[in-house]
């Protein structure tokens, strides 16, 4: 069994989180590799897929949405999980948040098993008119790495159970 952790990220936070997921899955016995959603041509070499997309102003990253749409037929024949990153507070660490509508549609299209929202990260010195205003109020790293790694281990266990 091999897994792909595809990510869609503009500022690198979701890409880093995808690396945490892949490392935890690999450590748990399911080799996983990381790739940007936009760079994935086919899914022939993978049995399971995790798609991690950043949330921006209540929307799932466009590359994640396009990845799901483009690969939907192949995703429906594999084990798929989705996650979002973005809340700039502790709400994601405190419990499961409802998926935004983009993610709900992606879950249906890919027949994903589940979705999880994790906190995001925004640097205080970020650029851009909207991002810099948000950073002035909520800069920080709200990702909970142990929570992300535990979720990834659960995915690895499910993939291994499928193999049995």
Image (cartoon, grey):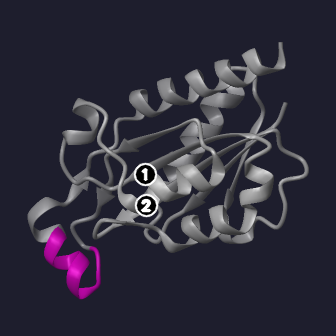
Q: Position of residue 6 (x, y in %)?
A: 65, 55
Label 2 sits on residue: 54
Q: Observer-nearest residue: 49 or 101?
A: 101
- Tell me whether the residue at label 1 lies in contact with that at label 2, contact meaning CB atoms closer than 8 angstroms: yes
Q: Image quadrant of residue 88?
A: bottom left
Label 1 sits on residue: 84
For the point 71% across and 59% down, the residue is 72
Label 1 environment density (alpha carbons within 10 Å; few <14, some 14–19, many ≥20):
many
Q: Is residue 49 left or right of residue 57?
A: right
Label 2 environment density (alpha carbons within 10 Å; few <14, some 14–19, many ≥20):
many
**In the image, is residue 152 above or below residue 137?**
above
- Which element is circle 1 on? strand
For the point 90% across and 52% down, the residue is 44
Which stretch is magenta? 126-134
**In the image, is residue 75 above or below residue 56?**
above
Q: Position of residue 78 (x, y in %)?
A: 77, 41
Q: Is residue 12 left or right of residue 55?
A: right
**In the image, is residue 62 above or below residue 6?**
below
Q: Is residue 62 magenta?
A: no
Q: Position of residue 104 (x, y in %)?
A: 45, 53
Badge count: 2
Q: Is residue 158 left or right of residue 115?
A: right
Q: Quadrant of the C terminus?
A: top right
For the point 82% across and 67% down, the residue is 41
Task: Tell which residue pokes out farthest to the left in this image.
Answer: 137
- Which element is circle 2 on? strand
State the CA–CA distance, disc 1 to disc 2.
Answer: 6 Å
- Mark 1 vs mark 2: which is more N-terminal? 2
């Amino acid at each position: 069994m091999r897994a792909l952790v595809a990510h869609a990220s503009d500022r690198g936070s979701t890409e880093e989180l995808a690396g945490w997921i892949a490392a935890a899955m690999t450590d748990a016995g399911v080799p996983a590799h990381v790739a940007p959603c936009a760079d994935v041509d086919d899914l022939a070499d993978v049995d399971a897929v995790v798609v991690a997309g950043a949330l921006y102003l209540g929307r799932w990253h466009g590359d994640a949405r396009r990845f799901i749409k483009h690969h939907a037929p192949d995703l429906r024949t594999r084990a798929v999980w989705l996650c979002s990153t973005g809340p700039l507070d502790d709400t994601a660490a405190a419990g499961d948040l409802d998926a935004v509508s983009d993610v709900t549609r992606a879950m249906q299209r890919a027949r994903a098993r589940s979705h999880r929202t994790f906190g995001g990260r925004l640097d205080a010195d970020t650029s851009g008119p909207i991002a810099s205003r948000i950073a002035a109020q909520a800069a920080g790293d709200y990702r909970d790495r142990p929570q992300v790694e535990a979720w990834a281990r659960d995915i690895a266990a499910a993939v291994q159970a499928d193999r049995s």
